[in-house]
Image (cartoon, rainbow, N blue to C red):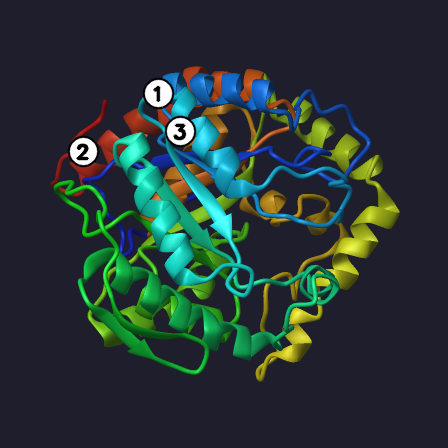
Amino acid sequence: MSTSTPVSPAADLRTPLKFAYWVPNVSGGLVVSTIEQRTSWDFDYNKKLARIAEDAGFEYALSQTRYAASYGADKQHEATSFSLGLLGATEKLKVIAAVHPGMWHPGVLAKWLITADHISNGRAAVNIVSGWLKDEFVNFGLPWLEHDERYVRTEEFITVLRGLLTQKDFSFAGKYYNIKDFTLSPGPLDIPGRAHPEIFFGGNSTAAQATAGRQADWYFSNGKDLDGFKENIAGVQASAAAAGRKPRFGLNGFVIARGTEKEARETLREIVAKAHVPAVEGFRDAVQEAGPSTKDGKGMWADSSFEDLIQYNDGFKTGLIGTPEQIAERIVEYKKIGVNLLLTCYLHFQEEVEAFGRDVLPIVRELEADLARKNDTELVGVK
Protein backbone atom coordinates (compact mmCIF):
# COMPACT_ATOMS: atom_id res chain seq x y z
CA MET A 1 0.00 0.00 0.00
CA SER A 2 2.99 2.29 0.54
CA THR A 3 3.87 4.71 -2.26
CA SER A 4 6.45 7.42 -2.77
CA THR A 5 4.27 10.49 -3.15
CA PRO A 6 6.25 13.72 -3.61
CA VAL A 7 5.70 16.31 -0.90
CA SER A 8 3.46 19.12 -2.15
CA PRO A 9 4.30 22.75 -1.36
CA ALA A 10 0.82 22.85 0.21
CA ALA A 11 1.70 20.19 2.79
CA ASP A 12 2.03 21.37 6.39
CA LEU A 13 4.70 19.04 7.74
CA ARG A 14 5.10 20.79 11.08
CA THR A 15 1.51 20.43 12.23
CA PRO A 16 0.22 17.00 13.29
CA LEU A 17 -2.71 15.65 11.30
CA LYS A 18 -6.06 16.07 12.99
CA PHE A 19 -8.62 13.29 13.19
CA ALA A 20 -12.40 13.44 13.22
CA TYR A 21 -15.19 10.90 13.13
CA TRP A 22 -18.70 10.97 11.71
CA VAL A 23 -21.25 11.10 14.51
CA PRO A 24 -23.77 8.28 13.89
CA ASN A 25 -26.78 10.41 14.82
CA VAL A 26 -28.82 8.74 12.08
CA SER A 27 -29.88 5.09 12.03
CA GLY A 28 -28.42 2.48 9.73
CA GLY A 29 -24.70 2.99 10.36
CA LEU A 30 -22.27 4.50 7.87
CA VAL A 31 -22.56 1.88 5.15
CA VAL A 32 -25.81 1.06 3.34
CA SER A 33 -25.46 -2.67 3.89
CA THR A 34 -27.07 -5.41 5.94
CA ILE A 35 -23.68 -6.39 7.37
CA GLU A 36 -23.57 -6.17 11.17
CA GLN A 37 -22.77 -2.67 12.37
CA ARG A 38 -22.35 -2.50 16.15
CA THR A 39 -23.19 1.20 16.04
CA SER A 40 -26.26 3.02 17.32
CA TRP A 41 -27.86 6.36 16.57
CA ASP A 42 -29.11 6.92 20.15
CA PHE A 43 -27.65 9.57 22.43
CA ASP A 44 -26.32 7.30 25.18
CA TYR A 45 -24.26 5.34 22.64
CA ASN A 46 -22.98 8.57 21.09
CA LYS A 47 -22.15 10.15 24.43
CA LYS A 48 -19.93 7.18 25.28
CA LEU A 49 -18.45 7.25 21.77
CA ALA A 50 -17.54 10.93 22.08
CA ARG A 51 -15.68 10.26 25.33
CA ILE A 52 -13.87 7.29 23.78
CA ALA A 53 -12.89 9.44 20.79
CA GLU A 54 -11.41 12.31 22.76
CA ASP A 55 -9.47 9.85 24.93
CA ALA A 56 -8.22 8.14 21.75
CA GLY A 57 -6.77 11.39 20.35
CA PHE A 58 -9.57 12.57 18.08
CA GLU A 59 -10.03 16.35 17.99
CA TYR A 60 -13.31 16.66 16.04
CA ALA A 61 -16.66 14.97 15.52
CA LEU A 62 -19.15 15.83 12.74
CA SER A 63 -22.89 15.47 13.32
CA GLN A 64 -24.86 14.63 10.17
CA THR A 65 -27.87 16.65 9.05
CA ARG A 66 -30.86 14.70 7.72
CA TYR A 67 -34.57 15.39 8.03
CA ALA A 68 -36.16 12.72 5.82
CA ALA A 69 -35.45 9.00 5.61
CA SER A 70 -32.94 8.27 2.87
CA TYR A 71 -30.19 5.69 2.15
CA GLY A 72 -31.57 3.51 4.96
CA ALA A 73 -31.40 6.27 7.59
CA ASP A 74 -34.97 5.83 8.78
CA LYS A 75 -34.43 7.74 12.03
CA GLN A 76 -32.46 10.97 12.47
CA HIS A 77 -31.51 13.23 15.36
CA GLU A 78 -31.19 16.95 14.56
CA ALA A 79 -27.54 17.92 14.20
CA THR A 80 -27.21 21.15 16.20
CA SER A 81 -29.03 19.97 19.33
CA PHE A 82 -27.25 16.60 19.18
CA SER A 83 -23.90 18.37 18.84
CA LEU A 84 -24.64 20.56 21.83
CA GLY A 85 -25.42 17.45 23.87
CA LEU A 86 -22.09 15.89 22.89
CA LEU A 87 -20.23 19.10 23.75
CA GLY A 88 -21.78 18.95 27.21
CA ALA A 89 -20.66 15.35 27.61
CA THR A 90 -17.00 16.01 26.70
CA GLU A 91 -14.14 18.28 27.71
CA LYS A 92 -11.79 18.52 24.71
CA LEU A 93 -13.64 17.29 21.62
CA LYS A 94 -14.74 19.88 19.06
CA VAL A 95 -18.14 19.06 17.59
CA ILE A 96 -19.15 20.26 14.13
CA ALA A 97 -22.88 20.56 13.40
CA ALA A 98 -23.92 20.29 9.75
CA VAL A 99 -26.58 22.79 8.63
CA HIS A 100 -28.37 23.70 5.40
CA PRO A 101 -28.74 27.24 4.06
CA GLY A 102 -32.37 27.51 3.07
CA MET A 103 -33.44 25.76 6.25
CA TRP A 104 -31.51 28.12 8.52
CA HIS A 105 -31.12 31.88 8.51
CA PRO A 106 -27.44 32.80 8.94
CA GLY A 107 -28.29 35.19 11.79
CA VAL A 108 -30.12 32.47 13.71
CA LEU A 109 -27.21 30.08 13.15
CA ALA A 110 -24.71 32.74 14.27
CA LYS A 111 -26.68 33.21 17.48
CA TRP A 112 -26.81 29.45 18.09
CA LEU A 113 -23.09 29.12 17.37
CA ILE A 114 -22.13 31.91 19.77
CA THR A 115 -24.21 30.34 22.53
CA ALA A 116 -22.72 26.90 21.84
CA ASP A 117 -19.27 28.49 21.81
CA HIS A 118 -19.80 29.88 25.32
CA ILE A 119 -21.34 26.67 26.68
CA SER A 120 -18.50 24.54 25.31
CA ASN A 121 -15.62 26.93 26.00
CA GLY A 122 -14.86 27.36 22.31
CA ARG A 123 -15.44 23.85 20.94
CA ALA A 124 -18.46 24.36 18.66
CA ALA A 125 -18.17 24.54 14.86
CA VAL A 126 -20.45 24.29 11.83
CA ASN A 127 -20.33 22.53 8.48
CA ILE A 128 -22.29 24.35 5.79
CA VAL A 129 -24.03 21.89 3.46
CA SER A 130 -25.59 23.51 0.41
CA GLY A 131 -28.24 20.81 0.13
CA TRP A 132 -28.66 17.96 -2.30
CA LEU A 133 -31.80 16.08 -1.18
CA LYS A 134 -34.54 17.84 -3.12
CA ASP A 135 -37.46 16.13 -1.38
CA GLU A 136 -36.45 17.58 2.00
CA PHE A 137 -36.84 21.12 0.71
CA VAL A 138 -39.86 20.58 -1.54
CA ASN A 139 -41.81 18.54 1.01
CA PHE A 140 -41.11 21.17 3.67
CA GLY A 141 -42.55 23.76 1.28
CA LEU A 142 -39.17 25.47 0.92
CA PRO A 143 -37.76 26.85 -2.34
CA TRP A 144 -35.52 24.40 -4.22
CA LEU A 145 -32.62 26.03 -6.01
CA GLU A 146 -30.74 24.36 -8.83
CA HIS A 147 -27.15 23.37 -8.24
CA ASP A 148 -25.01 26.41 -8.99
CA GLU A 149 -27.61 28.78 -7.55
CA ARG A 150 -27.41 26.92 -4.24
CA TYR A 151 -23.78 27.98 -4.03
CA VAL A 152 -24.69 31.61 -4.71
CA ARG A 153 -26.93 31.42 -1.67
CA THR A 154 -24.31 29.53 0.34
CA GLU A 155 -21.67 32.17 -0.34
CA GLU A 156 -24.01 34.89 0.90
CA PHE A 157 -24.94 32.71 3.88
CA ILE A 158 -21.31 32.28 5.01
CA THR A 159 -20.55 35.97 4.37
CA VAL A 160 -23.41 36.94 6.68
CA LEU A 161 -22.55 34.26 9.24
CA ARG A 162 -18.94 35.38 9.49
CA GLY A 163 -19.90 39.05 9.50
CA LEU A 164 -22.29 38.61 12.41
CA LEU A 165 -19.70 36.57 14.31
CA THR A 166 -16.98 39.19 13.92
CA GLN A 167 -18.50 42.66 13.44
CA LYS A 168 -20.73 45.11 15.22
CA ASP A 169 -23.43 46.96 13.29
CA PHE A 170 -23.02 44.47 10.46
CA SER A 171 -24.85 45.17 7.20
CA PHE A 172 -25.19 43.13 4.04
CA ALA A 173 -27.36 43.49 0.94
CA GLY A 174 -27.54 40.45 -1.30
CA LYS A 175 -29.83 38.35 -3.43
CA TYR A 176 -30.91 36.09 -0.57
CA TYR A 177 -30.08 37.96 2.64
CA ASN A 178 -30.35 41.56 3.74
CA ILE A 179 -28.95 42.56 7.12
CA LYS A 180 -29.03 46.09 8.46
CA ASP A 181 -26.80 47.39 11.26
CA PHE A 182 -27.06 44.23 13.35
CA THR A 183 -24.94 43.34 16.37
CA LEU A 184 -25.03 40.01 18.18
CA SER A 185 -24.10 40.31 21.83
CA PRO A 186 -22.26 38.59 23.30
CA GLY A 187 -19.92 37.70 20.51
CA PRO A 188 -17.91 34.47 20.36
CA LEU A 189 -15.25 33.80 22.95
CA ASP A 190 -11.92 35.54 22.39
CA ILE A 191 -9.64 32.56 21.80
CA PRO A 192 -6.05 33.06 20.64
CA GLY A 193 -5.37 31.73 17.17
CA ARG A 194 -8.89 31.94 15.77
CA ALA A 195 -10.99 34.77 14.43
CA HIS A 196 -14.30 33.04 15.19
CA PRO A 197 -15.70 29.51 15.58
CA GLU A 198 -14.57 27.35 12.68
CA ILE A 199 -16.61 27.14 9.48
CA PHE A 200 -16.35 23.91 7.48
CA PHE A 201 -17.69 23.49 3.97
CA GLY A 202 -17.83 20.72 1.37
CA GLY A 203 -18.68 20.06 -2.27
CA ASN A 204 -16.91 18.67 -5.33
CA SER A 205 -18.32 20.83 -8.11
CA THR A 206 -16.56 23.80 -9.69
CA ALA A 207 -19.03 26.16 -8.01
CA ALA A 208 -18.42 24.49 -4.64
CA GLN A 209 -14.65 24.69 -4.99
CA ALA A 210 -14.75 28.37 -5.86
CA THR A 211 -17.04 29.14 -2.93
CA ALA A 212 -14.91 27.10 -0.54
CA GLY A 213 -11.75 28.93 -1.53
CA ARG A 214 -13.34 32.33 -0.88
CA GLN A 215 -15.25 31.41 2.27
CA ALA A 216 -14.30 28.23 4.16
CA ASP A 217 -11.89 27.80 7.05
CA TRP A 218 -11.91 24.09 6.25
CA TYR A 219 -12.83 22.33 3.00
CA PHE A 220 -14.23 18.79 3.35
CA SER A 221 -13.77 16.41 0.43
CA ASN A 222 -15.63 13.18 -0.18
CA GLY A 223 -13.39 10.14 -0.27
CA LYS A 224 -10.77 10.26 -3.04
CA ASP A 225 -7.65 8.42 -4.09
CA LEU A 226 -4.42 10.44 -4.07
CA ASP A 227 -4.75 11.78 -7.60
CA GLY A 228 -8.46 12.42 -7.15
CA PHE A 229 -7.86 14.48 -4.02
CA LYS A 230 -5.22 16.61 -5.72
CA GLU A 231 -7.58 17.28 -8.60
CA ASN A 232 -10.51 17.99 -6.29
CA ILE A 233 -8.77 20.65 -4.21
CA ALA A 234 -7.03 22.40 -7.11
CA GLY A 235 -10.01 24.66 -7.70
CA VAL A 236 -10.26 25.46 -3.99
CA GLN A 237 -6.58 26.38 -3.85
CA ALA A 238 -6.85 28.60 -6.93
CA SER A 239 -9.91 30.41 -5.57
CA ALA A 240 -8.32 30.80 -2.14
CA ALA A 241 -5.08 32.19 -3.59
CA ALA A 242 -7.01 34.80 -5.56
CA ALA A 243 -8.78 35.83 -2.36
CA GLY A 244 -5.60 35.81 -0.27
CA ARG A 245 -6.85 32.98 1.91
CA LYS A 246 -5.42 29.64 3.09
CA PRO A 247 -8.17 27.16 4.01
CA ARG A 248 -7.27 23.78 5.45
CA PHE A 249 -8.36 20.48 3.96
CA GLY A 250 -10.24 17.51 5.35
CA LEU A 251 -10.78 14.16 3.60
CA ASN A 252 -13.39 11.48 4.26
CA GLY A 253 -12.29 7.86 4.64
CA PHE A 254 -13.88 4.60 5.76
CA VAL A 255 -11.46 2.70 8.00
CA ILE A 256 -11.21 -1.08 7.99
CA ALA A 257 -8.21 -1.94 10.18
CA ARG A 258 -7.65 -5.65 10.73
CA GLY A 259 -4.78 -7.96 11.67
CA THR A 260 -4.02 -8.71 8.03
CA GLU A 261 -4.77 -7.01 4.74
CA LYS A 262 -6.64 -10.14 3.65
CA GLU A 263 -9.02 -9.84 6.63
CA ALA A 264 -9.64 -6.17 5.85
CA ARG A 265 -10.34 -6.90 2.18
CA GLU A 266 -12.70 -9.72 3.15
CA THR A 267 -14.64 -7.29 5.34
CA LEU A 268 -14.97 -4.86 2.44
CA ARG A 269 -16.15 -7.67 0.17
CA GLU A 270 -18.77 -8.66 2.73
CA ILE A 271 -20.01 -5.05 3.01
CA VAL A 272 -20.42 -4.88 -0.76
CA ALA A 273 -21.97 -8.34 -1.05
CA LYS A 274 -24.58 -7.41 1.56
CA ALA A 275 -25.34 -3.97 0.13
CA HIS A 276 -28.95 -2.83 0.58
CA VAL A 277 -29.52 -2.48 -3.15
CA PRO A 278 -32.81 -0.50 -3.17
CA ALA A 279 -31.45 1.99 -0.60
CA VAL A 280 -28.18 2.48 -2.48
CA GLU A 281 -30.00 2.91 -5.79
CA GLY A 282 -32.41 5.38 -4.20
CA PHE A 283 -29.51 7.36 -2.79
CA ARG A 284 -27.77 7.32 -6.17
CA ASP A 285 -30.89 8.58 -7.91
CA ALA A 286 -31.25 11.39 -5.35
CA VAL A 287 -27.69 12.64 -5.44
CA GLN A 288 -26.41 12.10 -8.95
CA GLU A 289 -28.55 14.90 -10.32
CA ALA A 290 -25.77 17.18 -9.04
CA GLY A 291 -23.30 16.58 -11.86
CA PRO A 292 -25.70 16.93 -14.81
CA SER A 293 -27.20 20.08 -13.31
CA THR A 294 -23.89 21.95 -13.21
CA LYS A 295 -22.53 23.93 -16.12
CA ASP A 296 -19.52 21.65 -16.57
CA GLY A 297 -21.01 18.32 -15.46
CA LYS A 298 -18.94 18.12 -12.28
CA GLY A 299 -20.63 17.52 -8.96
CA MET A 300 -20.65 15.55 -5.72
CA TRP A 301 -20.97 11.80 -6.44
CA ALA A 302 -21.03 12.45 -10.21
CA ASP A 303 -18.34 9.79 -10.81
CA SER A 304 -19.26 7.43 -7.95
CA SER A 305 -19.97 3.77 -8.71
CA PHE A 306 -22.60 1.63 -6.98
CA GLU A 307 -19.88 0.20 -4.74
CA ASP A 308 -18.60 3.68 -3.86
CA LEU A 309 -22.09 4.79 -2.80
CA ILE A 310 -22.49 1.95 -0.30
CA GLN A 311 -20.43 4.28 1.90
CA TYR A 312 -22.40 7.39 1.17
CA ASN A 313 -19.51 9.82 1.22
CA ASP A 314 -17.25 7.71 -1.03
CA GLY A 315 -15.19 6.56 1.94
CA PHE A 316 -13.87 3.40 0.28
CA LYS A 317 -12.08 5.48 -2.37
CA THR A 318 -9.59 6.80 0.19
CA GLY A 319 -8.18 3.31 0.71
CA LEU A 320 -7.87 3.18 4.51
CA ILE A 321 -8.20 -0.60 4.39
CA GLY A 322 -5.55 -3.00 5.67
CA THR A 323 -3.34 -3.42 8.70
CA PRO A 324 -2.76 -0.52 11.12
CA GLU A 325 0.68 -0.03 9.56
CA GLN A 326 -0.69 0.08 6.02
CA ILE A 327 -3.43 2.52 6.99
CA ALA A 328 -0.99 4.80 8.81
CA GLU A 329 1.31 4.83 5.76
CA ARG A 330 -1.63 5.67 3.50
CA ILE A 331 -2.73 8.50 5.77
CA VAL A 332 0.72 10.10 5.71
CA GLU A 333 0.75 9.89 1.90
CA TYR A 334 -2.34 12.11 2.00
CA LYS A 335 -0.58 14.51 4.35
CA LYS A 336 2.15 14.88 1.72
CA ILE A 337 -0.35 16.26 -0.78
CA GLY A 338 -2.05 18.71 1.57
CA VAL A 339 -4.56 16.89 3.79
CA ASN A 340 -4.77 18.41 7.27
CA LEU A 341 -7.59 16.33 8.73
CA LEU A 342 -8.96 12.81 8.22
CA LEU A 343 -12.72 12.45 8.73
CA THR A 344 -13.20 8.77 9.50
CA CYS A 345 -16.03 6.26 9.76
CA TYR A 346 -16.28 2.62 10.81
CA LEU A 347 -18.52 -0.43 11.01
CA HIS A 348 -18.37 -0.64 14.81
CA PHE A 349 -17.71 2.87 16.07
CA GLN A 350 -16.96 2.54 19.77
CA GLU A 351 -14.53 -0.35 19.52
CA GLU A 352 -12.93 0.72 16.25
CA VAL A 353 -12.44 4.38 17.22
CA GLU A 354 -10.72 3.16 20.37
CA ALA A 355 -8.59 0.72 18.34
CA PHE A 356 -7.67 3.46 15.84
CA GLY A 357 -6.32 5.60 18.66
CA ARG A 358 -4.40 2.67 20.11
CA ASP A 359 -3.10 0.93 16.98
CA VAL A 360 -3.03 3.43 14.08
CA LEU A 361 -2.51 6.91 15.51
CA PRO A 362 0.86 6.20 17.23
CA ILE A 363 2.25 4.90 13.92
CA VAL A 364 0.93 7.99 12.12
CA ARG A 365 2.75 10.22 14.60
CA GLU A 366 6.02 8.31 14.14
CA LEU A 367 5.74 8.55 10.36
CA GLU A 368 4.86 12.27 10.55
CA ALA A 369 7.91 12.95 12.72
CA ASP A 370 10.15 11.05 10.29
CA LEU A 371 8.66 12.92 7.33
CA ALA A 372 9.26 16.27 9.00
CA ARG A 373 12.89 15.43 9.83
CA LYS A 374 13.59 14.27 6.27
CA ASN A 375 12.36 17.66 5.07
CA ASP A 376 14.49 19.67 7.50
CA THR A 377 11.70 20.62 9.88
CA GLU A 378 10.10 19.33 13.07
CA LEU A 379 6.68 18.02 14.03
CA VAL A 380 5.38 20.25 16.80
CA GLY A 381 2.50 20.11 19.23
CA VAL A 382 2.03 16.32 19.40
CA LYS A 383 0.05 15.53 22.53
Dot 3 corresponds to which residue? Answer: 87
Dot 1 corresponds to which residue? Answer: 362
Dot 2 corresponds to which residue? Answer: 379
- Determine if residue 354 is in view: yes
Confirm or deny contact between disc 1 and disc 2 (CB under 8 A).
Answer: no
Could you give the CA–CA distance between mark 3 and mark 1, rounded to whole angstroms?
A: 26 Å
Q: Residue at x 38, y 81 (%)?
A: 174
Q: Is residue 346 left or right of residue 270?
A: left
Residue 222 lies, in percent from the top left, at 54, 53
Q: Which corner quadrant holds the C terminus? A: top left
Mark 1 residue element: helix
User: Which one is in front in this view, the residue at disc 3 or the one at disc 1?
Assistant: 3
Q: Nearer the viewer, residue 298 or 124?
A: 124
Q: Residue at x 67, y 49 (%)?
A: 67
* Tag 1: amino acid: Pro
Residue 134 lies, in percent from the top left, at 70, 65
Residue 126 lies, in percent from the top left, at 41, 48
The answer to which of marks 1 and 2 sits earlier in the sequence is 1
Residue 158 lies, in percent from the top left, at 37, 64
